[in-house]
Image (cartoon, rainbow, N blue to C red):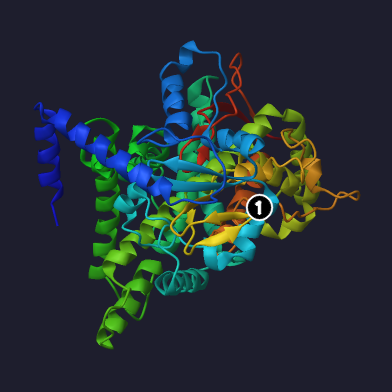
């Protein structure tokens, strides 16, 4: 195996000499040959825009976006993330169409019926994960989010789900853990708001810390103070890493994997992010290993190490339960259990600021059911239909994971009259599902009432799938719903939120990475009587 340092030295040497010209010519010729050779064997694939040589459709969709972002402060043109652009292309090529990232065929699925048909009715075909270079380099195709579909993944997911449930995952017993973090958020909000002098408070650090501490208590057996420098750095690095992978020149790694090792720019930054997160998590695993008491497991990490040692003692050869695999599982849960839920809370509070009438209506419902002398609990959930409808409507509009996690066709199949070759990357466009005019009236408008029936009771719709659908549905769906409800109701029960005086509302296009985060905003908070 070629070492990282050797590859870095090689890249540095190439970049510092005229050899770079020869390298570029070689890469160009090689990728042209691969591109046209692959296209020659593709028959009856879904239609799509004509790809550019070497970069494929990447050139049409992303290079103009890079240029626009470079000069967006001087431009009045509206920003479009990839999910919006992909949704618009469906009106040209249909709800099933193809793109190329380099020579890799990508099929985009749009609209509820198409996404449901693929992921629910053909799970044996579309449940796999692609070996996308950028993701493969970072995850080694291990863990439970990006690992390929098969017996190893099923065994690891089942173990993690069963173990987490034993520690309260998705159960009412986890409520005190969530509320504990909320008390810190409330007290810090008041302090920071007072210190701001009316300029407002950035909610993101407090919310992400509170959300992350819930999953940390389950998988790492500890909570971190929101001002813990290392913990705060890890959360910031996690967000930055997701943005780099999807929303920067690092996307080119999927066409030219060796770019990952370039010693400058976002490529160097991405490697540093990976190193920092790796060191943080491996230190925690090492500490668990040193202090492990098999009779008194503290968290998922302990339970995994116990299972690993048991299989080793039983002489099981080739077991997938290894410390290396544990590292990637913890990484998956740490990231997935923080970023999506934290961004959802931030989006909901932003919409409450932008729609003060809805904020007041939610608060009035909470006051009527809960009163002013206790905090909202999960037991109140069934009696707060408008509040739940409001949370669901913001989730629908913002689609925090707008393109889902990439799927892959595990076999060549016929779908909707087209041939989907084995190895094709499949993107379920959840943004298009939640903006599908065939299932939603006036889909671009904010209207919580769409989730209520004529009697004001909560109306659940099968076309509402913020956590995905099929065998790869988000494992943490129940936990996320608990956190969203408790955080939103407790914060709105305690505070009134508004923008600082004279501050324009932030744009609603968000910051597109693997997840869709709201643009940075600050709020002023005031205690409700």
Quarter of the rendering containing residue 469: bottom right
**x then y, percent, for residue 241:** 36, 41
Q: Residue furthest top?
A: 74
In the figure, 275 relative to 412: above or below?
A: above
Let me know if residue 396 appears in the view.
Answer: yes
Q: Image point 61% across, 42% down: which residue?
A: 431
In the rendered image, residue 176, in percent from the top left (x then y), is placed at: 56, 59
The image quadrant where one finds the N terminus is bottom left
Q: Is residue 456 left or right of residue 54?
A: right
Say which of 265 and 88 sits in front: 88
Left or right, 343 with respect to 369, comes to left
The residue singled out by tag 1 in the image is 114
Q: Secondary structure at mark 1?
A: helix
The image quadrant of residue 326 is bottom left
Q: Position of residue 226 (x, y in %)?
A: 41, 43
Disc 1 residue crowd, few under 14, some 14–19, many 20+, Cα 10 Å: some
- Residue lying at 44% horizontally and 71% vertically, measured from the top left: 150
Residue 299 visible (yes or no): no
**Closer to us: 326 or 35:** 35
């Amino acid at each position: 195996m070629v070492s990282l340092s050797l590859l870095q030295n090689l890249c540095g040497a190439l970049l510092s000499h005229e050899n770079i010209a020869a390298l570029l010519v070689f890469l160009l010729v090689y990728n042209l040959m691969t591109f046209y050779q692959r296209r020659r064997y593709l028959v009856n694939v879904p239609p799509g825009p004509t790809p550019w040589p070497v970069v494929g459709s990447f050139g049409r969709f992303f290079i103009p976006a890079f240029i626009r972002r470079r000069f967006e402060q001087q431009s009045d043109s509206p920003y479009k993330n990839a999910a919006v652009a992909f949704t618009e292309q469906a009106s040209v090529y249909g709800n099933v169409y193809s793109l190329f990232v380099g020579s890799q065929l990508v099929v985009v699925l749009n609209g509820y019926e198409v996404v449901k048909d693929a992921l629910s009715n053909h799970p044996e075909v579309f449940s796999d994960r692609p070996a996308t270079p950028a993701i493969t380099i970072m995850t080694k195709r291990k863990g439970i989010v990006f690992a390929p579909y098969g017996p190893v993944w099923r065994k690891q997911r089942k173990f993690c789900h069963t173990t987490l449930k034993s520690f309260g995952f998705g159960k009412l017993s986890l409520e005190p853990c969530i509320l504990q973090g909320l008390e810190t958020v409330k007290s810090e909000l008041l302090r920071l708001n007072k210190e701001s002098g009316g300029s407002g408070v950035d909610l993101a650090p407090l919310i992400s810390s509170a959300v992350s501490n819930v999953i940390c208590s389950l998988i790492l057996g500890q909570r971190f103070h929101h001002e813990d420098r290392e913990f705060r750095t890890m959360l910031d690095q996690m967000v930055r890493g997701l943005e780099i992978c999807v929303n920067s020149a690092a996307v080119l790694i999927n066409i030219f994997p060796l770019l990952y090792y370039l010693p400058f720019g976002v490529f160097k930054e991405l490697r540093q992010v990976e190193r920092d997160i790796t060191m943080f998590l491996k230190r925690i695993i090492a500490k668990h290993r040193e202090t492990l008491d098999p009779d008194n497991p503290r968290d998922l990490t302990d339970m995994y190490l116990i299972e690993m040692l048991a299989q080793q003692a039983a002489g099981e050869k080739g077991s997938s339960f290894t410390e290396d695999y544990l590292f990637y599982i913890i990484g998956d849960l740490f990231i997935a259990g923080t970023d999506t839920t934290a961004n959802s809370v931030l989006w909901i509070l932003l919409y409450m600021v932008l729609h003060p009438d809805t904020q007041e209506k939610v608060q009035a419902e909470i006051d009527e059911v809960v009163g002013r002398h206790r905090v909202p609990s999960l037991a109140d959930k069934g009696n707060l239909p408008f509040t739940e409808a409001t949370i669901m409507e913001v989730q629908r509009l913002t689609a925090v994971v707008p393109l889902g996690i990439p799927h892959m066709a595990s076999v060549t199949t016929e779908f909707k009259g087209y041939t989907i070759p084995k190895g094709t990357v499949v993107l379920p466009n959840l943004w298009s599902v939640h903006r599908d005019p065939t299932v939603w009236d006036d889909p671009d408008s904010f209207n919580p009432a769409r989730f209520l029936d004529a009697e004001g009771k909560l109306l659940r719709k099968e076309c509402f799938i913020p956590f995905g659908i099929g065998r790869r549905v988000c494992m943490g769906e129940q936990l996320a719903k608990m956190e969203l409800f408790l955080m939103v109701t407790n914060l709105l029960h305690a505070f009134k939120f508004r923008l600082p005086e004279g501050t324009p509302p932030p744009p609603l296009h968000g910051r597109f990475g693997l997840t869709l985060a709201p643009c940075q905003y600050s709020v002023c908070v005031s205690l409700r009587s």
